[in-house]
Image: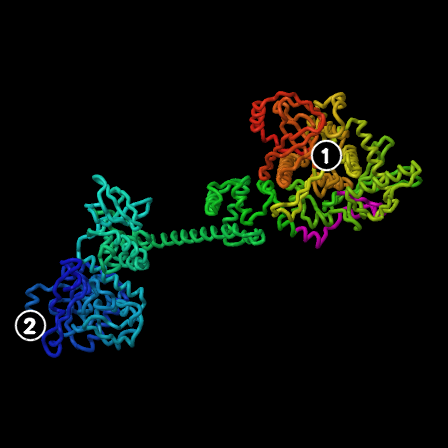
Amino acid sequence: MSRATAHSAGMLAPDPPALRAPSRGRRAQQPPIRSYGAGSGTPFGGFQHANIPALRCNTPAGAVQAMATVATARDRRSSGGGSTDTRTGPSRRLRGWETVSMAAARPPRAVGTVKKKSQPQLSASASATPASVCTVTAGARTAIASGQGWPAGGLYGVVAAVAPRRSIPAAVRGGNAPTGTGGGFNLSPRVSSLPPHLIPLATHHLHHQRPDQETLAHRGSHAHRAAFGGSQRCNARALRLAEAVFRLHAIKSSGAAASVSGQTGALQEGSLVEYDKNDRGVLAVLVAPDGKKNWFAVDQTGRRQSITPKQIQLVLPGSGYKEADVAAFTAAAEVADMSLLEIAWEIAAEAGEPLELRELATLLYDDTTPKTLYVTHRMLQRDTLFFKLGSRGGSVRSYVPRSAEDVAALRQQQEAAEAARKAAEAWRVAVAAARAAKTRSQLPSAAEWQSGPFADRIAALKAIALSALPRIDDVTTQLALASIQLAGAGSRADPDVAAALLVEIGALRRHEPLQLLRRGLALQTSPEQEEEALALLASPPPDPDAASREELTQLTVFTIDDASTTEVDDGLSLERLPGGTGIRIWIHVADPTRWIRPGCNLDVAGRERIRTLYLPWGSVPMFPRRLAEGPFSLREGQVCDAMSVCVSLGTDGSLARPRVVPSRVRVSHKLTYDQADAVLAAAAAAGEASEADTVAPSADCSSMGLDAAAVADLVALRDAALSRRAYREARGCIEIPLPEAKIHVPYSHLDRARPSVNITRISQWDSASRGLVAEMMILAGEAIGTIGAEAALPLPYRGQVDPPDLPSTKALAELPEGPCRGFALKRCMTRSSVAAAPQRHASLALDAYVQFTSPIRRYVDMVAHHNLKAWLRGEPLPFSRSDIESLVSAGGEAARELGAAERESESYWIAEYLRLNWGAEYPAMVLGWQREDLQLAAFLLDREGLEVVARVPQGTVFSPGDCCVLVPTEVNPSAGFYRFYVAGWTSGLEAEQGEGEEEEEEGEQGWAETKEDVVVARSSA
């Protein structure tokens, strides 16, 4: 009995008479040929029960031609004749079977139909002599070579027609026989006339065996060895494909009922089902009912759970399953060869019909046992690329093969998803590795992160970290959020969270200036500007003022700046007039307009930047550094182009006979403020000693390169500055004697966990050299303002209206001199303004004032230079009055933005300074009330020169100038926030007693509501 009996009784049938060996000659001794597959006699299961023309075989046309040629070649060797019907083409009659080749004019798919003879025909032909063998000619050969598909019987009908009976396939592989044992079919022609290119196709489609066996090692009790030019190995996938073709037709022609339910159906104890749990299929065996409808099920882990009928997705046939079967079925599904699905899809897609689960199981494994059904089901669930769940007919599941276009599109999506999954896992691993690094040096550098495989994620995280920039697109936001979640850093795309993650993995420095980057401020000049700077250095433009430049290299020129200053844009000289009749003061200003013309790229870039940005860790120059620190600056020992302002002073310090000229100067002495203070202090001490006829302290300044004449010039300049201040004070200038805090952080420390942060107190009232330089710069501004006003030149004149609510003289007199008076005055000051016409500056007590002395660092100073130089040459002015007003209007907002960025950066580093020195106490002096209604007072830290705000307990009475100790209670550098409390008073406190704890708590609540006022406000004298 055929093994097909295990599947369907209807699939077992006797072999067709045509395939039984005739009882004559030597062949009569051979046993009859039997079928070992699901059908008999033909390569298709249930062939004798099917409508043969309706069974479509989608075997490639080349394979069809190869198979036909094999049979034809064999037939030609064994027979020389045949019968041909002139109307329909050649025909071949075998016992019980008739093969007819349709006319060539018919569609190619109609060629080669096999018709079953009726019983009378079989009886009549039983004793007939076998018909002569015919060859495939005329229309049949044309149709075979046409490249079209064949009906199921057509392919094998042609083979049967053109080959002798001993060459007809003996059997097809069927039942559960493993490949290479008893299934398969065999042809044994000799193919001396077979075209070489058809040999592989014939081999692939006619010989079924495993890849590790010889291609021509046929199976079955009557297997022969075909001689296709020697033993060859065939492609394993082609073998699988051919095998699947035959199975599909056997399945579709059998018409057996489905054996697996896609719905719950009748459930019973011992049923094996798959149920849904959290969108995941779980295989389990039903062990007992749970109420009327539900069931207790046990999965492969042994867990017992109640499930509802609605949860059940699949019921496997049979009953009496045990818990061990669950594990066995699951294990079999885990090791299934998923590549088989593509082969099954290629066959099913050609057929174009839905397949039931049983049919797919037979197609894949030639088996429909419950385990095979479950394995097939899991394969379809795991890989949805090739098949989709079709509509249910009753309780039967069907699967529809996707179109080639859908498979290609879905494959692309799956490949993209898999690539994304791998990329996500790689990111998670990379973050974990970065977190495991013991030192910062073991982390990838920021450049490596930005150019490596995670560049897109780093860019997205940076976009979120700098989210104050223009709106970020959704794709970037989602990528950043996914990166944060994969790293376990949070669940929201928050700027601070993104920044913290970037810092943690080394893609950002620990102290990256996010305050600036979030405002869209560039920290470096663009490559285009750098290229233009190099071009300028390589080929300096002609100097339009070369003919009128005055040679002032004979003067002793001092530059006095901070030690960290790299852009030197002003210097001072003293010229003594012949005969001791007086002195002239020269203020030399750098001349970048000798290199930059209005409207050029560098000029436009400077206009956009407005000014140089000064930060605790360095500066962001307005122009490329190679220019700003190079030919633009007044460099020591070199001849430099400059714009020099010459003034004389009256006996009262008033300005007399100012003029401005293009010049060439040589810086003689480059001093720092500390060095200049030391020189002036030594000179003052020497003068006092001389008046007292005592030995003066050493006034030798040779170590700084200054001789006696240079020291005398510096002292004379200091005296002129004092005269100027007295002159302005007499005119009602408003001085605000508040110190400033100088914050310094080495640039190389921006990635350190504990950077070196220094805050020092500086004040022009505490430094003679700072007062000297400040007064000389004001003098130059007045000189240019006076020249411009007299010539009616449109220049950027700076002014300030009189403050309306200045403290009275009596009120100021009641305050201690110094910072307390400065604090009281500062609170009443108004903003300054810039206009194209002269205006009074109340604080400076000047009728006209133009900022002129910092053209490397301020764009409005360059505007003044351009117009003054054009006026001196007698040329049209590059900037009209309306141009200046437009520039001022456009630059005002940008200037305020820069100021805010500087304050935010300073607040960050102040908070970091307090964090690094946590627990320290800070001596301070109270300046006055900041907001008395909220009990907020302003304090000045003695050492640091910082002005801070702190709450004082209700009922505390203090006076400006009282001293105390402040202690920080909260610090948040990233927010630039810090909070102080008064730890104790050291002088001048009169406090009311009896304040209870309840009042303290109320005060704390009020403080919490106004904590934004805690951040220090730097003075801007």
Segment colored magenta: 532-561
Q: Secondary structure at mark 1?
A: loop
Q: Quadrant of the C terminus?
A: top right
Q: Position of residue 95 (x, y in %)?
A: 11, 69
Q: Quadrant of residue 858?
A: top right
* Front in this rendered view, residue 31 or 939: 939
**Residue 612 visible here:** no
Which residue occupies 12% across, 65% down? 14
Q: Is residue 730 left or right of residue 621?
A: right
How would you rate the neighbour count of disc 1 (Cα within 10 Å): few for under 14, some for 14-19, many for 20 or more? many
Find residue 833 and report its horizontal and vertical position in percent. Answer: 69, 31
Q: What is the quadrant of the N terminus in the image?
A: bottom left
Residue at which label 1 appears: 739
Nearest-to-viewer mark from 1 and 2: 1
Q: Is residue 877 above or below residue 155?
A: above
Q: Secondary structure at mark 2?
A: loop
Q: Position of residue 560 (x, y in %)?
A: 78, 43
**Amino acid type, callout 1:** Pro
Q: Is residue 550 magenta?
A: yes
Question: Considering only vertical position in the picture, is 462 above or below 731?
Answer: below
Camera-side residue of 801 and 463: 463
Residue at 8 percent of width and 72 percent of height: 128
Sequence-first disc among 1 and 2 = 2
Who's the residue at 80% across and 30% down the image? Answer: 728
The residue under label 2 is 127
Q: Amino acid at mark 2?
A: Ser
Image spot of residue 323 (x, y percent): 26, 51
* Residue 471 visible in image: yes
Residue 893 horizontal side relative to residue 384, left or right: right
| Magenta stretch encompasses residue 293 | no
What numbered label is drawn on residue 726? Answer: none
